[in-house]
Image (cartoon, rainbow, N blue to C red):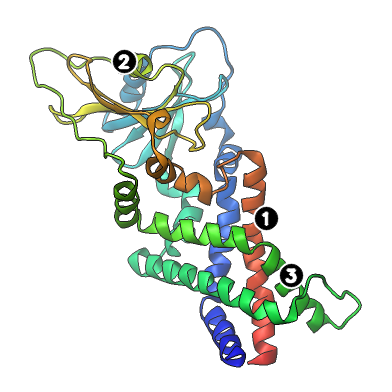
């Protein structure tokens, strides 16, 4: 039985080696993807603070004047005083504006961003649905490799590396020891990765199990008069969720659409937060909201799944762990292929 398990471990590992190598390296990158994006294009992301910020509606008017053919569907207020205001267009372009002067800093297409390219590699090998299927299958195989690896380790119980032994033995010990000590984190990253890949199927099951009620849809009541300003929608959301920072504002496009305002409490782990307020585009009335502070265990798990996967769950320490473990995936792939070459 052990020989059969070893063969399965070796050959399934070989089959998933290349996708797991790509997923591991890009996963490490994505842990710090936002910081790298800012470092690549600092002229778009950073501004010199000075005075009061201009109203968001004024900033939208400025960027609309600079890009008259674009239709804007959302914006992100800056999280720090030295950051720019970002607007999203239906063309999948991002426009950046200095919130103090209203100066348009420039635009960036979503598909040209380094982080976006790494995400597409990580999630689908830049090969669409086929690549997505390969990544998910490889991730499921990695769960099998973790379990079978622990079973195979149990007989040998290797707890350290014999550095004075030959290179192959050092490679074998490293594969065994690093696999053992990282097994739990490996398993969590793989499991949450599969859950995120099939969130439309997995998340509703978790919510039903916990008894969490989904946020009902909302519509604006069509009436005479203009749409309220972005600033009025933000103010309504801040009154509804005091203490939360507004991170994203979805702008209404159809007559019945609402402002969809996302917010983040200080204790939230998701970068944009998972609390949401829906604001009527004409009256400014709140048409529904969801607060992470009222979430049960199922809603909390769903809301923090990506934070768990990317290591944001406990801040810097878990981000470092996620970064190192993702790189370790690449190391395990290399050492595993060497073991296959020797034993298969």
Whether residue 308 is visible, yes or no, is: yes
- Which of disc 2 and disc 3 is earlier in sequence? 3
Q: Is residue 76 above or below residue 101?
A: below
In the rendered image, is residue 114 in sight?
A: no
- Disc 1 designates what residue? 324
Residue at 58% in and 68% down:
21
Identify which residue, 220 or 92, lies in the foreground: 220
- Depth check, mark 3 against mark 1: the one in front is 3
N-terminal of the pair, mark 3 or mark 1, is 3
Q: Marks 3 and 1, how far apart in space?
A: 15 Å
The disc placed on residue 177 is 3
Q: CA distance from mark 2 to mark 1?
A: 42 Å
- Residues at marks 3 and 2, CA–CA distance in whole angstroms: 54 Å
For disc 2, the marked residue is 236
Relative horizontal placement of residue 65, taking residue 15 as reference (left or right): left
- Looking at the picture, tell me which residue is in the foreground, 299 or 25: 299
Q: Quadrant of the N terminus?
A: bottom right
Q: Residues within 10 Å of mark 2 (few under 14, many from 20)?
A: some
Q: Nearer the viewer, mark 3 or mark 2?
A: 3
Residue drawn at (58%, 71%) of the image: 146
Q: Is residue 207 left or right of 282 when viewed as pictured? A: right
Q: Are marks 3 and 1 in contact (CB under 8 Å)?
A: no
Residue at the right extreme, as displayed: 164
Q: Of the two numbered discs 2 and 1 on the same chain, state the one appearing first in sequence.
A: 2
Residue 167: name its quadrant: bottom right
């Amino acid at each position: 039985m052990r020989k059969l398990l070893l063969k399965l471990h070796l050959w399934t590992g070989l089959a998933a080696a290349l996708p797991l190598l790509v997923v591991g390296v890009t996963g490490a990158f994505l842990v710090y993807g936002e910081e790298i994006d800012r470092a690549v294009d600092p002229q778009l992301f950073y501004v010199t603070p000075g005075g009061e910020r201009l109203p968001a509606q004024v900033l939208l008017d400025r960027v609309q004047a600079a890009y008259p053919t674009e239709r804007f569907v959302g914006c992100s207020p800056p999280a720090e005083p030295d950051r720019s205001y970002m607007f999203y267009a239906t063309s999948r372009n991002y426009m950046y504006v200095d919130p103090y002067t209203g100066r348009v800093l420039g635009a960036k297409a979503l598909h040209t961003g380094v982080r976006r390219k790494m995400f597409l590699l990580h999630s689908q090998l830049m090969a669409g649905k086929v690549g997505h299927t390969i990544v998910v299958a490889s991730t499921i195989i990695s769960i099998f490799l973790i379990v079978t690896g622990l079973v195979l380790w149990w007989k040998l119980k290797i707890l350290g590396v014999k550095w004075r032994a030959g290179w192959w033995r050092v490679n074998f010990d490293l594969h065994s020891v690093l696999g053992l000590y990282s097994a739990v984190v490996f398993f969590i990253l793989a499991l949450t990765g599969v859950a995120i890949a099939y969130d439309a199927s997995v998340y509703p099951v978790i919510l039903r199990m916990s008894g969490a009620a989904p946020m009902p849809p909302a519509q604006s009541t069509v009436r005479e008069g203009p749409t309220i300003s972005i600033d009025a929608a933000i103010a309504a959301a801040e009154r509804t969720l005091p203490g939360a920072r507004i991170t994203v504002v979805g702008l209404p496009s159809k007559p019945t659409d609402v402002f969809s305002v996302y917010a983040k409490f200080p204790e939230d782990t998701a970068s944009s937060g998972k609390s949401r307020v829906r604001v009527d585009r004409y009256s400014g009335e709140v048409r529904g909201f969801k607060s992470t502070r009222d979430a049960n265990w199922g809603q909390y798990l769903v809301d923090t799944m990506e934070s768990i996967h990317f290591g944001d769950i406990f801040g810097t320490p878990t981000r470092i762990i996620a970064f190192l473990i993702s790189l370790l995936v690449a190391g395990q792939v290399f050492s595993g292929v060497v073991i296959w070459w020797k034993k298969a």
